Amino acid sequence: MKRLHEDRIDLIKSYLKSRKLSPELLPEILDHLACEAEERLWDGKPFEQIYSSIVETADNEVVLNLNADHKNLLAMEKSLNDIVFEGRNKLYGAYDLRKSYGQTIQKSVLMGVALFGMIVFFPNLYARLVPDPKPGDIAYIVEARPIDITRELPKPMPEKPEPAPEAKTLRSLPPVVMQDDEVAMENLPPVLKELENAAPAAKTLEGIEDLEIIVPPAAEFGNAKTAAADVKTREESIFLHVEQAPEYMGGVQAMAAFLQKNLKYPVAAARAGIQGRVFVQFTVGSDGNIEDVTALKGIGFGCDEEAVRVVKMMQNWMPGRQAGNPVRVKFTLPIAFQIN
Amino acid sequence: MENNTTSNEYVRGTLKTIVLNLLAEHDRMYGYEITQEVKERTGGAIALTFGALYPVLHKLEQEGMLLTESVEVDGRLRKYYSLTSPGSEAARNKTNDLERFIDAVRLLLAPKNLATE
């Protein structure tokens, strides 16, 4: 089997190139001619003769016709882009962009129309999907819980007895026998004339003359009131530390049980996995009522509000005592929220 | 040579069908193989020139009838052609069409009294 030498293939190739054969056709025509040449070589013909016959069959006119035929047959698919980019670098990107321009425009128009349509018809669609509420529908159920509001009544203050107006008196003691040097000159018994406007008594007082009945004058009520207000402010002051601290009725364990019973873990906190301590500050009134409940430091997610709510529910406290008297005491209670 | 030029006139219109039909019989073929096959089977009556064959092959490839694969043989690239499924369908259709056409031409070419029978 005789194979065509590479040099000879190159010779045919360069010949075809010199005839300006289309590069798309070149490798195939080369193979074709080489096959033909090999067959003739097997017949025992010299290469030179074969080559000249090849040149004869593939002369200038044949190649030109071939190029033209090829171009014409494939031309139907050739667009303006192919003509513009003929012999240029098609890999650069501009060719692809131009080639896919129509598709891109088509896609973008479709997307734009779809988007616009969606925006225009969205309210309509929404109205269809979500029907209007009927007048009988219940939107929300709000549970009303009675709240005990105990108003702190100002304690009636023990009225300080108004010093009664006293009658003018003169020191007039029954005479006592004493030594001369022990007798004080100012303690002399009153003269009769002095006793005309004053009553005899153990002490001398600059009272009101001729006063028989002691009646507190109506005009002096204002004076009494201011005295009472004075007393009140002192009594109502809130203590931070007292001798006997306020305590939940029944002790710490009873309070813990109460909290356990009434505290509900807020759903939001449970969902978020929140735990920790809420410091609730309140005032234990002198009557044992809880007032001014606030969460000092909380952990949020409804825990603070829940703690405040439960603390407000506690009412039976034993008030703190200062010097034996019940007083208002500020109290801070940490409430722990823990997920079991 | 003279014989070739006259046959070329008819070959031109039927070349697509001939190529598709040959490829339907073979798994895959390359250009020179096709010309040799045609030459052998027609006893040299029809000789395909490369000038006619390759543009048609390229056109069929462009139309999606043919698949190509390039294999390097003896230092040069050889392009093998095989039919795609639309290609084999087109081969059947075109062969049928051509047969009917040939029958019709035969009727036309036959003496008139025979044709009317």
Image: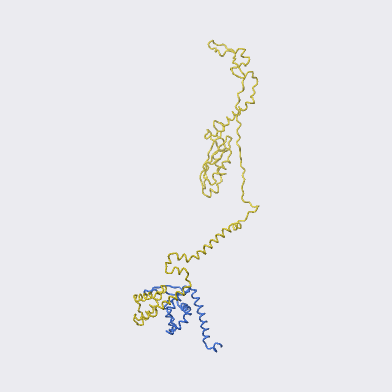
Q: Is residue A83 above or below residue B46?
A: above
Q: Nearer the viewer, residue B73 or A235?
A: B73
Q: Is residue B42 left or right of residue A280?
A: left
Q: Which residue appears at 44% of the width and 73% of the height?
A: B68
Residue A166 drawn at (x, y percent): 61, 20
Is residue A27 at all visible to an observer of this figure?
no
Residue placed furthest toward the bottom? B113
Chain coloured yellow in this rendering: A
Colour chain B is painted in: blue
Q: Kindly identify the residue that appears in the image at 50 percent across and 76 percent down.
A: B90
- Image-quadrant location for residue A134: bottom right
- Say if A164 sits above or below A99 in the image: above
Across and down, in percent, residue A253 comes to: 54, 40
| Whole-percent x, y for residue B55 in the image | 44, 76
Q: Which residue is nearer to you in this view: A238 or A275? A: A238
The quarter of the image holding the N terminus of chain A is bottom left
